[in-house]
Image (spheres, grey):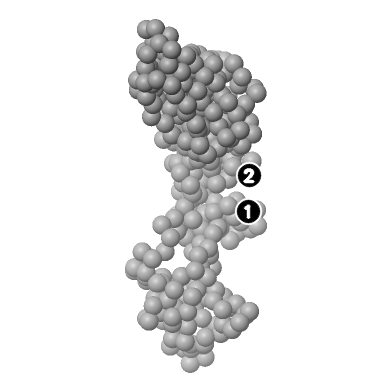
Amino acid sequence: MTARDVFDFLNYLGRKDPMGNITSEDNFNNLIPVAANIYLSNIMGVSENYSPRKPNINYGLGKNQFVENKILPLITNEDINLDVNGQVAYSDLSANYYHPYSFSYEYSPGYEVPVVMLNSSEFDDWKSSPNLGEDEENPFCTFRGSYIQFAPADIYGETINFTYIKRPRVPSMGYAIDYATAESVYLDNAAYIIVTNAGTSGNTIELSTSTDNLGSYEVQSGDSASDVMKRLAAAINENRYVHGCHAIYDDSKLWINVESGSQSGSLTIDITGTIATDDDDFSTRSTQFDWEDQVDCMFEIIEILLGMVGISIKNNLIAQWSEMQQQK
């Protein structure tokens, strides 16, 4: 499910009539990163229902494979290097690091051994134990105030394979409000141009990609920069279903949105006369959820969003339904 699919489904569930949205596009873009992080806390087992009297949470990291599958999209890895003290500073880890998953290192060629993660007290006890002690075939580590400490001394200077749970991407929905229809148009892969000078009568502007001629417009007497963008958009949309691009003028920019195929890279602008433009090539305008391919996860995120929106618009029925769904 794309960010736009979530927006549309949220509106379908929440609005009372066929017209309008339950929340605006801008509000939605402010809410979805929050929902992604709340969902991360939920699947990690950082529950708001936790209390000393109920310390055992039955949902979260390490509980069962069902939950592990929800965490899989966030699992990644990197190589980290130990300094002479057998330490790695948190500041040397990737910026998107959230939670450790596992450590390992190559004890001998082709033989990878796991590094056991211990709390600080266990680490100290294990290190000083006459029965356990330090053994390079059975390394261990702990998390200190600003660094990760590894033992034994024999693995100092080694490269450690660090598998970790990353922070979710910051999802966002790219969109433009079509000046001609007042509709919100979803932007995924899109380019834009801004006509800053309309030129003079008889000047022409033509847009194309490496594979298609999108459309052109000849400036008429009295045209403003805005007029050129509106009429160029109309010319492009005449062949919209041939070249697979939809032109949207939003009263500021002329967006060229890819609807089909794989248009990307450069947007070519051919001009005669004194027409002047600013432009930006095709690129991704929306950022999807890490769980976009996992429908059950996306429905759980939608339930979180419905609760947030229900509180915002003071709709108790929506908020209560969302809470009931999340407690199942």
**Is the residue 116 above or below the residue 90 in the image?**
below
Q: Which residue is mark 1?
A: 69
Q: Which residue is mark 2?
A: 294
Sooner in the amino-acid sequence: mark 1 or mark 2: 1
Nearest the camera: 83 or 23? 83
Q: CA distance from mark 1 to mark 2?
A: 9 Å
The residue depicted at 57 percent of the width and 18 percent of the height is 237
**Can residue 240 be seen from the camera position used here?**
yes
**Is the residue 237 above or below the residue 153 in the image?**
above
Q: Position of residue 251 (x, y in %)?
A: 40, 18
Dot 2: element = loop
- Quadrant in which the N terminus is drawn: top right
The residue depicted at 54 percent of the width and 16 percent of the height is 235
The residue depicted at 43 percent of the width and 34 percent of the height is 280
The residue depicted at 55 percent of the width and 32 percent of the height is 209
Dot 1: element = helix
> Marks 2 and 1: in contact by CB < 8 Å?
yes
